[in-house]
Image: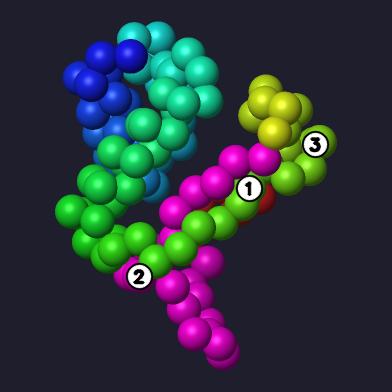
Amino acid sequence: MDKNFINEAARILVNLRMHKAPMENLPERCRPRNEEEAYKIQDELHRQFTKHGFGTRIGYKIGCTTPVMQNYMNIDHPCVGGIFEGRKHYSPVSLDFNGFFSLL
């Protein structure tokens, strides 16, 4: 995958996140062909999140750990994603439900 497609895919994803907009699919030209390309897109996405005020990446989380979610995502393995300084919360905390999307 060309570096330009990696940057374009990450720009699309960060824009959706910043505007709390749902995503159907990336355009065909931006879709990763394998796990390695997907993580290259994620690395660029993490860099862009930092530039957009999410803070630095401070850790990782694991997602898609159940067969139900793997089937939903059309993958056969768990995935890793970043946790950012600007998005962490200390307990106890109350968060506004309207600050999130796709919860239901």
* Residue 63 numbered mark, or none: 1
Q: Position of residue 58 (x, y in %)?
A: 39, 66
Image-based side of 42 in relation to 6, left or right: right
Is 68 included in the stretch rendered in magenta?
no
Q: Position of residue 45 (x, y in %)?
A: 32, 41
Using the image, determine if residue 94 lies above or below residue 86: below
**Amino acid type shown at disc 2:** Glu
Quarter of the picture holding the N terminus: top left
**Amino acid type shown at disc 1:** Gly
Q: Position of residue 28 (x, y in %)?
A: 40, 9
**Amino acid type shown at disc 3:** Val
Q: Quadrant of residue 52?
A: bottom left
Of callouts 3 and 2, the N-terminal one: 3
Looking at the rendered structure, the number of numbered marks drawn on it comes to: 3
User: Which region shows up in magenta?
Assistant: 78-97
Give the residue at mark 2: 85
Using the image, determine if residue 53 lies above or below residue 104: below
Please tell me which residue is depicted at 42% across the width and 17% down the height of the picture.
Answer: 31
Please rate how many residues cluster around mark 1, counting C-alpha atoms within 10 Å: few if below 14, some from 14 to 19, many from 20: few
Please tell me which residue is depicted at 23% across the width and 21% down the height of the picture.
Answer: 3
Please tell me which residue is depicted at 32% across the width and 48% down the height of the picture.
Answer: 46
Give the residue at mark 3: 68
Q: Cα distance, mark 3 to mark 1?
A: 12 Å
Residue at disc 1, secondary structure: strand
Please rate how many residues cluster around mark 3, counting C-alpha atoms within 10 Å: few if below 14, some from 14 to 19, many from 20: few
Residue 45 visible, this angle: yes
Q: Cα distance, mark 3 to mark 2?
A: 30 Å
